[in-house]
Amino acid sequence: MAYLRILGICVFVIIGTAAELQRVGKAVKERDLIDTSTKEPVI
């Protein structure tokens, strides 16, 4: 039974990491779009 718990933790971590990467990637894309279109400093 312990391996099921480990597998569940791994799946949870992978999903969380993927969601975080997607969020960061979207933020970077938006920042690049703002930066290239307005030429204003990004905070």
Image (cartoon, rainbow, N blue to C red):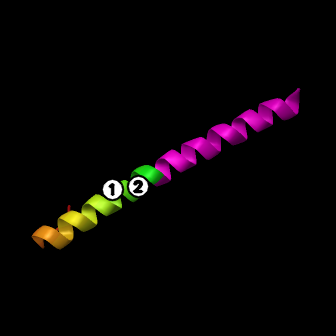
Write the residue at 70% across / 36% down.
9
What label does residue 5 carry, if any? none
Residue 29 magenta: no
Write the residue at 88% across / 26% down.
1
What label does residue 27 carry, if any? 1
The residue lying toward the viewer, choosing from 30 and 2, is 30
Whether residue 20 sits left or right of residue 32 in the image: it is right
Which element is circle 1 on? helix
Which element is circle 2 on? helix
Write the residue at 41% across / 58% down.
25
Packing grade of label 2 (10 A; few <14, some 14-19, many >=20) is few
Whether residue 37 sits left or right of residue 21 in the image: it is left
Q: Are marks 2 and 1 in contact (CB under 8 Å)?
A: yes
Write the residue at 48% across / 54% down.
21
Say which residue label 2 marks: 24
For the magenta stretch, what is the residue range? 1-21
Residue 18 magenta: yes
Q: Position of residue 15 (x, y in %)?
A: 59, 42
Q: Position of residue 2 (x, y in %)?
A: 86, 30
- Real-space CA distance between mark 2 and mark 1, rounded to the nearest whole angstrom: 5 Å
The C terminus lies in which quarter of the figure? Answer: bottom left
Give the vertical position of 36 relative to 19 (above or below): below
The residue lying toward the viewer, choosing from 18 and 2, is 18
